[in-house]
Structure formats: structure tokens, C-alpha cells
Amino acid sequence: MKLIQKISILVILLSSNINFAQEFNGYKYIVVSNLFNSSDEYIDDYFKISEQVSDYFTKKNMIVIKGLDTEKPRELKFNMCLGLFVKVEKNEKYMYIEFINCKAEKIKSIYVKGRNYADALLQIFEKLDQNPTYAYDEKLTSLGEFPTVENISKNENELKAYFDSTKIDDIEGIYKTYQSDSNYKLGIFKDGDLYKAIIIESDYLQWKKGDVKAIFESTAAEGVFSTKFFMGDKTSIETFANLEGGLVSIELKGENIKKDDMKLLRLYPKK
């Protein structure tokens, strides 16, 4: 350890500065990889480099996900472009840090030549600190690639006016997700022979106001609807929904979906 500390290092920055305000503010999450060697294999992080990098970004008020295999927040699963992926690599001669976006594009690279990794990290952090301002701005986030869904130009006030002036069916109304880690506010209204649920509010950037989140079709069973439901990534599944009082329960199941129900609680009208 003492011998390593005495070895001088040469820090070569492929980019002279990393501007948080311009280049990092579009990312809500920093995903820090475990330590790799030059063969892209996990190696023992003796100097806890990955941990130090994670701690650094945590102190910058960024939401850090430690390790590529760590369970990710639901919104990050649905839109990986919310994350900036940090790959840390080292061998006996150098350390290499890459900042990569959801499209596998390299945002920044820092190449550190030498074996004194502790000193190298300090110098890297000093460079990062030259412009330390960070504030997540969703307007700067790339939305990635998502399927197109129908968009219906109706807002909450228009829907309420329709509900107040028309004899509506039991499933129609303004709903909000209930007992769920997904936050949606939806308006369900009749459109021809179908009922469509459109986005009023959502935490997910890929979902815009008016986007169709679900399509319901009545069945011979009272309160049961054949349903086309669009997942967070806008892919669709065919399923069923059940209406009881002011609660709509949509059964979610599939190869990559944990069997569960999405519950929608009616907020308006109160009947």
C-alpha cells in the first residue's frame, strides 16, 4: 500500500471539463457500475472506487443506483434515458471512467494513467467540482424510443363538463391510481362502443396529457371489461378489468410482469 502511494500518476483528461448544468441535468439517476477490468469482467474493488464514485454523486444530490444489477426504480425501468450510466474500469496501469447515456452514446470519458487510484479519484473529483451545480430538469431528458399511442385532446375540465352534462355509464369518470407505485390520473369516457382512459397527470415523461392508457370493452358479465392496457413503456397487453363501485381493478400479467392488479379509484363524479 505504501509503495503504491509513492508511485506518481499522470492524469490525462480527454475532456477538460464536465459541465453539470449543461450535460448532467437531464439525468435523474446516476447508475454506477461495479468495477471492471479491461476485459469487461467484474474485479475486486480493493480501493472501493465504485463506492467512492457513488458517494461523490450522492453528495451532489443526484439519485445514485449502485451496481448495474441493482433493482431499479419503476420509472427508470420504463425509461432508461432517465439514467446516466457510469462505467469504472481499472488495471495495473490505468483507470478509466465513462459516462454513457441510454443510447450507448459516450457523454464524457476520463482516462487516468497510473496506479495510485486514490489520488487519481481526488483529481477527477476536483475537475468535476469546477462546475458543481446540479439540478434535475426533465425538459433536458431524452425520451428514448417508445411505441406511438393514440392521443385525444381532452383536458380534465372538459371531461368534468362532459360528465356533468351527460348521463354517463358507471365506468366513466376521473380516476387516480390506488395503492400503487405508479402515479397516474386518468379520465375514462365513452368513445363509440369503447371506453378510453386518457392521461391527465403522470410521473412518467413518456406519457403526455391525452395519451390513451387503456381501452375497455364491455362483456356479457356485468362489471367486467375486456381491456387493452398500455404499460409504462407503451407496449400493450390484452387483459381484463373489473368495476366494483368506484374502483376499477386491471389484471396485469405477462412473461416479464409480476402478476398484480392496477387499481384505479374514482375521484369524480362522486356517485
Image (cartoon, rainbow, N blue to C red):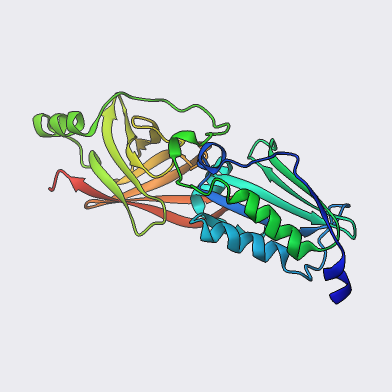
Q: Residue 19's quadrant in the figure?
A: top right
> In the rendered view, does 172 fall on the left or right side of 128?
left
Tell me if residue 34 can be seen: no
Q: In the current view of this chain or complex, which residue is farthest to the bottom?
A: 2
Where residue 91 sits: x, y (%)?
87, 58
Q: Is residue 153 above or below residue 46?
A: above
Residue drawn at (50%, 42%), measured in percent from left and top? 25
Q: In this view, does 34 lie to the left or right of 252?
A: right
Residue at point 33% right, 24% down? 152
Along the line of sight, which residue is nearer the eye, 60 or 271? 60
Would residue 106 appear left or right of 171 to someone viewing this image? Answer: right
Q: Nearer the viewer, residue 216 or 52?
A: 52
How many dots with numbers?
0
Asked whether residue 59 is in view, the answer is yes
Quadrant where the N terminus sits is: bottom right
The image shows residue 212 at horizontal and vertical percentages of: 39, 32
Q: Where is residue 186 in the image (x, y as percent from the top left)?
A: 30, 40
Depth order, front residue of 244/211: 211
Identify whether 47 is placed above or below 261: below
In percent of width and height, residue 87 lies at 72, 51
Identity of the residue drawn at 37% across and 49% down: 183
Q: Is residue 29 left or right of residue 16?
A: left
